[in-house]
Amino acid sequence: MAAYTVNDVAVRHAKRLIDARQYVLRSRFGLTEGAPDDAKARYAFVYGDFRRLHRMGLIACHYRAAEWRHKEIELAAHQLLQYLDQRTA
């Protein structure tokens, strides 16, 4: 199994997007099924489209990380989801 680490730059970027209100709260954002390993190995946990953060993307990251026991990524996604929900409440 590949080893994944939290990309701190991406986490900071996600927070900047949230603070700038560049997010989508409802979207059809799912997991990529059937993608070749060499295409997704480096960027397996995607939360948006570079311009906006997608809440469903964070949920997908959290779910996938929990499923494969990538605890640091699971916690980072959870914290970002909580941050987003606090900002949009």
Image (cartoon, rainbow, N blue to C red):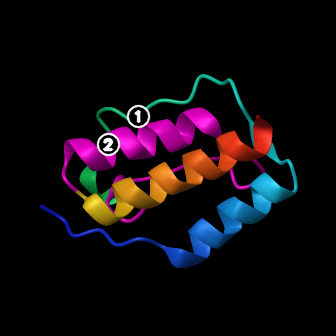
Q: Secondary structure at mark 2?
A: helix
Vertical order, 38 against 58 (above or below): below
Total marks shown come to 2
Q: Position of residue 32 (x, y in %)?
A: 40, 36
Q: Amino acid at mark 1?
A: Leu
Return the residue found at the far right: 20
Quadrant of the frame with the C terminus: top right
Relative side of 71 to 73, left or right: left
Q: Which mark is residue 75?
A: none
Residue at numbered disc 2: 64
Relative side of 60 to 1, left or right: right
Return the residue found at the far left: 1
The quadrant holding residue 17 is: bottom right
Q: Amino acid at mark 2?
A: Arg
Reading the chain from its start, which is encountered first: label 1 or label 2? Answer: 1
Residue at numbered disc 1: 31
Vertical order, 77 against 23 (above or below): below
Residue shown at 22% from the left, 41% from the top: 67
Residue shown at 19% from the left, 53% from the top: 69
Q: Which residues are magenta?
A: 40-69
